[in-house]
Amino acid sequence: MKKRLIQLLGIVLLLVCPVLSQAQINYQYWIDNNIGAAVSGTTTANGDISLAIDMADQTPGIHFYNLRAREGKKWGPVYRYLFAIPHEQQTDATRMITGYRYGFGDEMTTVTFDTPISEYTLNQPFDVPVPPLPTVIDDDCHFSFSDDEATLLRNITMEFALTFTDESNAMSSPIGTSFTLTDTHTSDIQTLEVAGSLPIEAHAQGGYSVVTFTIQSAGTYILKSSAACNLRLFSSDGAKITDVSADALIAGYSHEYEAGTYYVVAFGNENEITLTVSICDVNLLKPTLTYADNQVTITCAVAGATVYYTLDGTDPTTESTLYETPIPVDCNMTIKAIAVLSGIGTSPIASLDIKSFTVETPVITHEGNVLSITTATEGATIYYTLDGTTPTMESKVYTSPFTVTENGTIKAIAVKEGYENSAVADLNVNWIVINTCGYAIYDKNVKTLTFYYGIKPEDNRTSEGIWVYDADKTVFESYACHNPWYSTDITTVIFDSSFAKARPKTTAGWFYGCDKLTEIIGIEHLNTEKVLDMEYMFYQCSSLTNIDLSHFNTAKVGTGGEVLYALRGSMHFMFASCYNLTHIDISSFEISDNLTDPLDMQHMFSLCSGLKTVDISGFKNIHANMNGFFNGCSKLTTIYVSEDWSNQYITGSKMFQGCTNLVGGKGTVFQSNQIEKSYAIIDGGTDSPGYFTDKASMKMGDVNRNGVLDTNDAVDLIDFMAGKSPNGVTTTSADINSDGVVNVADLIMLINDLLKESSWP
């Protein structure tokens, strides 16, 4: 008859752990050596932990479970218990079970039942003996280190056997196993100071001591013991560095260390010994100076060293000040220190430059036009400037409040001996009312009209041939008085860089009738973003050969209502009768989409008889009256527009009257009976004839915009770069590589384009 001697369905464990308080307890348990599958839990019971563990998945044989508890940061010892899961075995029906025996190694324990039984289910954990501490630290011992404890991890092989007895005292076949368990042991870490000593307890019956020491300066150090002892040296991450024998340790073991923390496991000493770490290089004595909270602390990595220091940057000696406590610091200085150790010598000099004391940044305040400058640093001297430059100790010294008479930037610094100079303080004075405006000065002697922005001079100097005009209050009346500076003798117009600040609202008639004007210098300083009216601006400037209008902003032209300074906002006759202009590029011109009435652009280029090319590609679907727009432009051959051009909202008649040389982009030639706006379209050939050319088809590098790419473009580009004003060349056309700058890179690109166009090999 089959009898199941042992059947284990599950196990209930009860462990009583001694704890110091009722605080929360953390625990872990795991089966066999599978610590990676450890189960963690928490209990607040007074040391009693009850666990129900399902053993259904365990194989027949001997197993052990592990349990440990932790109160605070430190794990307690591991408690281990064995249990058996046997194979089923056959017994005679007449034989009864009277007990069982089990044991580890030679130590056996017998359990006898009061009454024999026919079958017995074993539900009994077996206490595993606590392994003794090792007598030798070898490669089977693995250590890990934390701030205050070391953990030993090792594998230990143990033997176990279990038998059952019947009434005849016969034993069943033993259930035996040889198993390996993972044992852990924690111990406190003792600290050994460099150049110091530490007693190590005896380990005659096994066990070990863990010691740590910190190397602050890399170099050679010596480990030494007072009597026989073995040790193993570890790095801070638990990696073994070396084993040191008892003989080597007694003689003094020398090793090259990097800066860092090290651990020593000492073992095998029959009696208490003394362990020391000492230096053998005087450089390791060099002290460390640390500045914090307005004081300097000096430390030495070697215990027993004496430190001397100076505060004036001189080299210290043993006659200098003895360091005892942190040094208070109240100004910038250089501190130097040495360390001296008997039997070793004097360290190299350590030095610390303190530059953390800086004068407080001045504060500039004002009451009206009276300025005051202060600093929170007592005893500091303040220096200041009135022109926006950075002050130095050569600048004016502030002594008392002062009055400012003009706008500008005031800057100040504060200086004190032993301190870093303060940061620069500044104050933008902009509340002083100054009557600035745009104005023009005509110098009859040199026939030059110059535009400025600033404080307008009060008086004309008519006896010197110099007149001053307010450019912000010009009034132009068509066909009447012209502008106040009007003169047919003007040959040169200059826009001073200061005029870039001006925002005129009209440029109408500014150069009306200046038939001797040959040059406009600095026109890029004319900002037209506020201009509402440009009519007659260059009317009859018949000697002018070139105008760079690439920066003109025309977005507001025509948006000022019906009357502006007695003028309509328009562009009519803007370039009329400029006989010597051959090329005009107004591709920067854009017209507002919000005009209530068509913009008056009548006769804008009327009678420009020398004009050959015009670029109006900035105009899109504009609302404008172009009556007589190109009237009398007898040499005009090409008009460039963008692909978005539309004549839908164009009004006016005789737009192309007299443009006898005009040719569209697809070859449509001028016909005297086709001078109306219907031909103001991009030429589509015979199917859709027009007089305009799509700018996209224009050759790159056609600097002078004459429709031909040749060496004349290179010559004109060189002249333009030299500051001259060749016909048809503008900043836009000269900027061939479109990087916003006209320079040699554009010339190189042009030459490459010319080589591609040529038939040269």
Image (cartoon, helix red, strand yellow):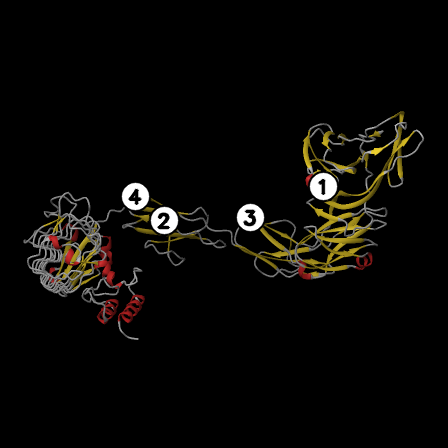
The image's mark for residue 368 is 4
Residue 615 in percent (x, y) is at: 19, 58
The three-letter code of the residue at mark 1 reads Asn
Q: Residues within 10 Å of mark 2 (few under 14, many from 20)?
A: few
Q: CA distance from mark 3 to mark 4?
A: 41 Å
Dot placed on the residue nearer the N-terminal end, 3 or 2? 3
Which residue corresponds to mark 1? 34
- Between 280 and 377, the one lying in front of the other is 280
- Between 525 and 669, the one lying in front of the other is 669
Q: Residue furthest top?
A: 115
Q: Secondary structure at mark 3?
A: loop
Question: Residue 317's quadrant in the figure?
Answer: bottom right
Q: CA distance from mark 4 to mark 1?
A: 84 Å
Q: Is residue 508 left or right of residue 760?
A: left
- Between 112 and 585, the one lying in front of the other is 112
The image's mark for residue 400 is 2
